[in-house]
Image (tube, rainbow, N blue to C red):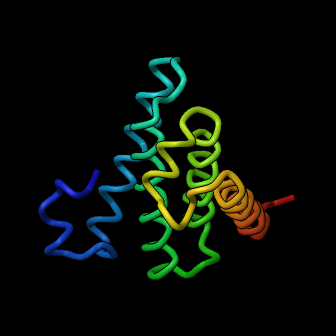
């Protein structure tokens, strides 16, 4: 979805302004999905996954891998992969060839993202 955002190329994928836009896009997609009440479509899930994945990469680089914002983004990554596996696995496999192009590879990535999310979130838990 950011292929059409001309400033990304100029600023770079890891620029804070790009990360901010990705956060806003994630929030807008989530709100749209909640308001519609319908199951998320493959394009919506792919947009969520792409934005969350790139946001996590930026957060990890700029904030460190154990920052609580990384946990939120990892949850979005895991949930998006899970949604795509359930509703549109071919779209996921086609979008990420050689990475998540099999059910086993995508399931492993989903589990790993959610495990990292839980581990980081536990560091900041008050319980």
- Residue extending furthest top? 37
| Residue placed most toward the observer, 87 or 29 | 87
Q: Position of residue 101 (x, y in %)?
A: 56, 57
| Residue placed most toward the observer, 82 or 26 | 82
Vertically, is 114 above or below 9? above
- Residue at 56% x, 46% y is 80
Q: How many labels does the image show?
A: 0
For this view, does 98 lie left or right of residue 116?
Answer: left
Q: In which quarter of the image is residue 55?
A: bottom left
- Residue at 60% x, 73% y is 67
- Residue at 81% x, 60% y is 126
Q: Position of residue 99 (x, y in %)?
A: 54, 66
Q: Quadrant of residue 62?
A: bottom left
Q: In which quarter of the image is residue 13?
A: bottom left
| Residue placed most toward the observer, 115 or 85 | 85
For this view, does 105 lie left or right of residue 63?
Answer: right
- Residue extending furthest right? 127
- Residue at 57% x, 55% y is 77
Q: Position of residue 112 (x, y in %)?
A: 72, 64
Vertically, is 27 above or below 101? above
| Residue placed most toward the observer, 24 or 29 | 29
Q: Where is residue 100 in the image (x, y as percent from the top left)?
A: 57, 60
Image quadrant for the C terminus? bottom right
């Amino acid at each position: 979805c950011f292929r059409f955002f001309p400033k990304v190329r100029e600023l770079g994928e890891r620029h804070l302004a790009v990360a901010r836009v990705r956060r806003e896009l994630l929030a807008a997609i989530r709100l749209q999905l909640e308001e519609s009440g319908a199951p998320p479509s493959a394009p919506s899930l792919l947009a969520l996954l792409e934005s969350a994945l790139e946001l996590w990469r930026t957060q990890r680089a700029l904030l460190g891998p154990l920052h609580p914002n990384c946990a939120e983004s990892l949850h979005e990554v895991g949930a998006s992969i899970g949604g795509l596996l359930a509703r549109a696995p071919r779209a996921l496999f086609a979008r990420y060839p050689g990475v998540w192009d099999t059910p086993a590879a995508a399931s492993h990535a989903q589990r790993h993202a959610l495990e990292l999310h839980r581990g980081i979130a536990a560091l900041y838990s008050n319980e």
